[in-house]
Image (tube, rainbow, N blue to C red):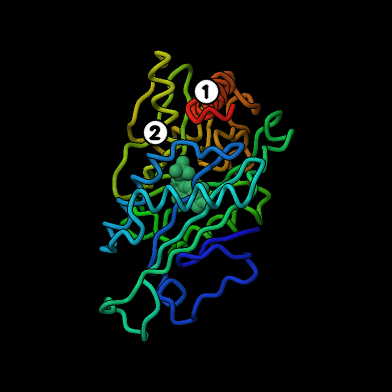
């Protein structure tokens, strides 16, 4: 697999970063995960917009610029052809003697690689997955896509150790999000997800799903979701660039609704798959390489 590091494309195994990199020493950096279907990045503009927002939030100058990111991503995909991929890209504040305060005149470290997007297991689509509820013990700026993910790592590990796919997090009795996903709940035909604030990541998939539902006149609300709403939901979904829309059918070992992936999930996933295919078709038609 070919990766990108500081201006060069090279085999991933040969990519090297100094132990003095501030990403390594402090988790001082941000990242993005961008899905790409058959070589075409999906919702690229929204991902680049969030990348710029993350950089600005940690006071790091954009080291590549809009054209630079687009050209690099295009070449990275061309060098890793075929299939569905999740592009991972990371920017840190670079290599400098260890000191908490920002270094002066240090170049940012820019790294990118691709990983295959695993299609959901047939059991997931047929039966759904389990999730657990945990207290949200993360910092106060979860709206920044920071690489500093220790609390997310510990929460997700707790889920895995209990045979679940995700930890769903609660702060003061209210849903925030998953350890690596946004969360939607369905009661009857009404869909809800928590509103954006500094406590959750503005997920690109979340926004896209909201727009899809609104476009199809489905009642959908961005409003507070309580622990009791989760425990009485007919359906719970996780959304992310790699999970797309995933049905949770067991919460802390108890069935969610009927304990099977629900009809609103099914309908929404269908809309999502159609939009994905349309977006890809449009890009291919535009570039004329059918
Ligand atoms: N994570 N919330 C958190 C904490 C996340 O880490 C993610 C995605 C999301 C969903 O965001 P989006 O729809 O833009 O992917 C929400 C990525 C996939 C990851 O860390 O690998």
- Give the residue pinned by disc 1: 278
**Residue at the spot x=52%, y=24% of the render?**
285
Q: Quadrant of residue 109?
A: bottom left
Q: In this view, does 149 lie above or below 253?
A: below
Residue sitting nearer the eye, 153 or 69: 69
Classify the position of the N terminus by image quarter.
bottom right
Q: Quadrant of the C terminus?
A: top right
Picture coordinates of residue 181, whole percent (x, y): 49, 44
Say which label, 1 or 2, has the lower sequence index: 2
Distance Cα–Cα, label 1 vs label 2: 18 Å
| Label 2 beta carbon less than 8 Å to ligand 1 | yes
| Residue 207, disc | 2
Q: Nearer the viewer, residue 83 or 70?
A: 70
Q: Quadrant of residue 194?
A: top left
Left or right position of 5 against 108: right
Q: Where is residue 126 in the image (x, y as percent from the top left)?
A: 71, 28
């Amino acid at each position: 697999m070919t990766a990108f590091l500081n201006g060069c494309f090279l085999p991933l195994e040969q990519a090297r970063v100094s132990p003095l990199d501030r990403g390594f020493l402090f988790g001082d950096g941000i990242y993005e995960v961008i899905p790409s279907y058959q070589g075409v990045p999906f919702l690229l503009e929204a991902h680049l917009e969030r990348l710029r927002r993350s950089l600005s939030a940690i006071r790091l100058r954009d080291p590549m610029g809009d054209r630079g990111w687009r050209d690099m991503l295009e070449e990275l995909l061309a060098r890793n052809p075929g299939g569905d991929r999740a592009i991972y890209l990371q920017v840190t504040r670079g290599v400098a003697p260890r000191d908490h305060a920002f270094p002066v005149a240090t170049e940012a470290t820019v790294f990118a690689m691709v990983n295959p997007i695993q299609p959901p297991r047939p059991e997931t689509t047929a039966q759904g997955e389990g999730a657990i509820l945990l207290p949200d013990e993360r910092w106060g700026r979860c709206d920044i896509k920071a690489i500093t993910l220790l609390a997310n790592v510990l929460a997700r590990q707790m889920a895995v150790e209990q045979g679940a796919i995700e930890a769903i997090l609660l702060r003061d009795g209210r849903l925030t999000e998953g350890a690596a996903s946004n969360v939607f709940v369905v009661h009857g035909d009404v869909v809800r997800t928590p509103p954006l604030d500094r406590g959750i990541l503005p997920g690109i998939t979340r926004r896209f799903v909201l727009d899809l539902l609104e476009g199809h006149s489905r009642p959908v609300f961005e409003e507070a979701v309580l622990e009791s709403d989760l425990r009485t939901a007919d359906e719970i979904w996780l959304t992310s660039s790699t999970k797309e829309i995933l049905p949770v059918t067991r919460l802390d070992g108890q069935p969610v609704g009927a304990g099977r992936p629900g009809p609103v999930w099914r309908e929404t996933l269908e809309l999502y798959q159609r939009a994905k295919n349309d977006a890809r078709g449009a890009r291919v038609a535009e570039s004329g390489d059918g």
